[in-house]
Structure formats: structure tokens, C-alpha cells
Image: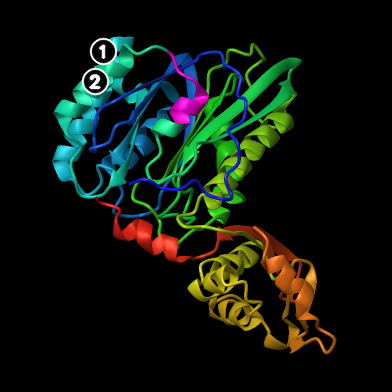
Amino acid sequence: MNLDRSPLALPFPAIPPIGGVTLRVARARYKEWDRCDLTYAELAEGTAVAGVFTKNVCCSTEVEMGREQARLGQARALIVNAGNSNAFTGYRGREAVEQIMAQVAGHLHCEPSEVFVSSTGVIGVPLPKDKAREGVAAALGAPPCSWEEAATTIGTTDTFPKGAVAETIVGGRRVIVAGIIKGSGMIAPDMATMLGYLFTDAAVEPGFLQQCLSAANESTFSCITVDSDTSTSDTVLAFATGKAGNAPLASFDDPGADAFAAAIHDVCRQLALLVVRDGEGAQKLIEVRVTGAVSDESARKVGLAIANSPLVKTAVAGEDANWGRVVMAVGKAGEPADRDKLSIGFGGIWAARDGLPLADYDEAPVAAHLKGREIQLEVDLGLGEGRATVWTCDLTHGYIAINADYRS
């Protein structure tokens, strides 16, 4: 499937090497395509790991096993397969994952539980064990590759590689946090969304790394949606190699802990927005800002109801300032709302206030705003102090075309 690059795409950033992380790619040929489809990240001994995973109850074996492995807190390697999600594949899918883990563990002389596996692609087709074996062997012997090559390899319907980086100072040491991600469709926030991987050379205890990742997830990956569909394979993992030489971070009481947590959040936010920018068929990035809710969580749910509404998304695609569709989405969210206190705006211009359209409302500047690539919708519920920001994209004919041909 040849897809045009998203008009919302951003250039891949310059990500420096991270101590304790070596990336390689190879061709396992999980689909009939002429490209690398297996990414291998080798991690230094003692690397800490944390993860957040999909809440989809029909999740893949990779997710089930990854949850248990992440609780152990240690990692030596990551394998990501593209083209086959290995979800809904029963014992055959599990055997393929266990084979990959054992193969990499034998190479690194580590425990299989320290080898994390992710797969993405078509659901319902067992990962071929022969191709997996050959692909892993090729990756283990491949030369190191760039961050951009690794990010490109894990994509499926992605139209551009996605990466992010942040730097900070922890305990007097320069620390790097970098990440790559894939995701374009089947994107809805029910933990995280898509497959994303963060790497840092900071020394961090697994428990604190998990605390930072989980907190960042709540206001980044769990605040994006493309199509309201939560994948069977969604995974975000964070790896900390400890090669920066700082005193290990164990809590927010440690020097530099706040700066490290902010860097994790920064990279997660960058990655989350890149996924929305590459929403299947997307032409516009939509930011939904909700204020005046009874709580932050209530604001987030209202924001997601708006962001997931096909009627809102198609109105934006058609550059139609139809604020009535926003009213509808607020009302169906199942959260506290009062029609007579509701205010709605576009691009900083209020169209309705306190349940009524403004008498002097001029649609011309709103129409001009909607012709742009980045759109802002504002909703004030007028009930409290709760607020949230959610991101989505418009819904176009391109989404249908991509998904109608997905298995070909």
C-alpha cells in the first residue's frame, strides 16, 4: 500500500546516540513488501523498564506477556514486528513470541523475560515462526542503524517516521530522553495508543520510571484519538539504561527528578501529537480545549466525545463552523453539562456563550481559521475548574480508502 505523506507531517528530529542502546533493522518479510519490517533494540545490562498497555480485552500475546515482564522491571532487548499483529492467534501466536524471546535471550545470555516483543499489523494471522526465526537472526547480525531507520521500520500505514527528543540535567549530568512511535489508524486513548518506545540514558529505578510514564500517559497518549478504535496491540515502553552516570532516581525527592519527569512528559506529548498528525487520511490537526468542567477527568471525557464524533470531524474536514455538532457531542458525553451555561468557540473566537449564539457573531474569521491545517475548538461548560486538552484529526474520504484496502 503506497500512501502519500501526510500534509501535517513534521521532519524527523536529530536524535543523538543514547548510551546503552543499539538499534538494528532487518527483513522478516511478514508481508509481501520490499522493506525492513523488524526493529531490534539491544539494551545494556541493568536497563530498567516500565510500560503501559492497551485495555482492549482481546489483546495480543505480546501485550499479555509484556505486562508481566514490565512488572519485573528489567530489560535487555526489544523486538518490534511490522505487518502482522499476531493478535487473536491463540497458542500459535504465543509460541512465536516465546521463540523470539528465547532466540534473543540465547544471543544475549539473559533471561527470556528481559526480551520484550511487540507486533503490529493485520489481526488474526499467526506470526510465522520460520520468518520470525530468520528475521531475528538477520537483525542480530545487522549493522547498527539510525533512529529514523528504526522508526520507519516499525510503521504500517504510517506515512512518515515519527521521533522525538528532549534533554535535561539530572544530578549534574546531561540526560537524553528520546522516543520513536508508530500509529495512524485504530487509535483511541484507552491507556496509550499505538506502539511507542522511549529510551533514556538516565539511571532510574523501575518503580519511579513507571510512575513517570504512567503520569505522562494520562495527559498525552490517553488524550488523543483518530477513530475511536482501541487497538489489540497498543503498547508504550520506556527503557532507562543508566549510562548517563547520575545517582539513580527513585522518587520525586531526588535531585533532578522533576526535570526528568518533565522530559518524559515532553517526549510523550511530542510523540502523541505526531500520531494524530498522521491520522489515516488526515488533512487537519484538531485541538479540543475543554474548561469549566466539574473535574479534569470529566473535561477529558467531554473532550474525547467531541474528538470522536464523526459529525464534528467531518464538519472540520468540510471547513464548516457547525457548532451545533459540538453541542451534540457535549450532550452525549454522559458528563455533567448545562445547556444554558455552555459556550463554544473556534480558533479563539466565541460563537455561542451561555447557551445562546452571540448576536454579533461574525463567521468570516472562523471560516478562515477552519481553512488552516491546525484547528482549535474551545468549549466552556461553566460548571467548575476542571480542564483538559484532547487532540484528534478530521475525517476524510482518505480514511475509508486506506482501511478498505488494509489487508491487500
Magenta segment: 144-151
Residue 253 - label: none
Q: Where is residue 342 in the image (x, y as percent from the top left)?
A: 72, 81
Note whether residue 292 is visible.
no
- The answer to whether residue 147 is magenta is yes
The image shows residue 408, relative to residue 169, as above or below, that is below
Say which of 106 and 353 sits in front.
353
Q: Position of residue 195 (x, y in %)?
A: 43, 40
Mark 1 vs 2: CB contact within 8 A: yes
The residue indicated by pointer 2 is 102
Mark 1 to mark 2: distance in Å? Answer: 6 Å
In the visual, does 129 lie left or right of 22?
A: left
What kind of residue is marked 1?
A: Gly
Q: Residue at x 42, y 61 (%)?
A: 399
Say which of 357 and 114 sits in front.
357
The residue indicated by pointer 1 is 106
What kind of residue is marked 2?
A: Ala
Q: Position of residue 248 (x, y in %)?
A: 62, 18
- The answer to whether residue 206 is magenta is no
The kind of secondary structure the magenta stretch mainly shows is helix
Q: Is mark 2 on a helix, strand or loop?
A: helix
Q: What element carries label 1?
A: helix
The image shows residue 247, relative to residue 15, as above or below, that is above
Residue 35 sits in quarter: top left
Q: Position of residue 284 (x, y in %)?
A: 59, 59
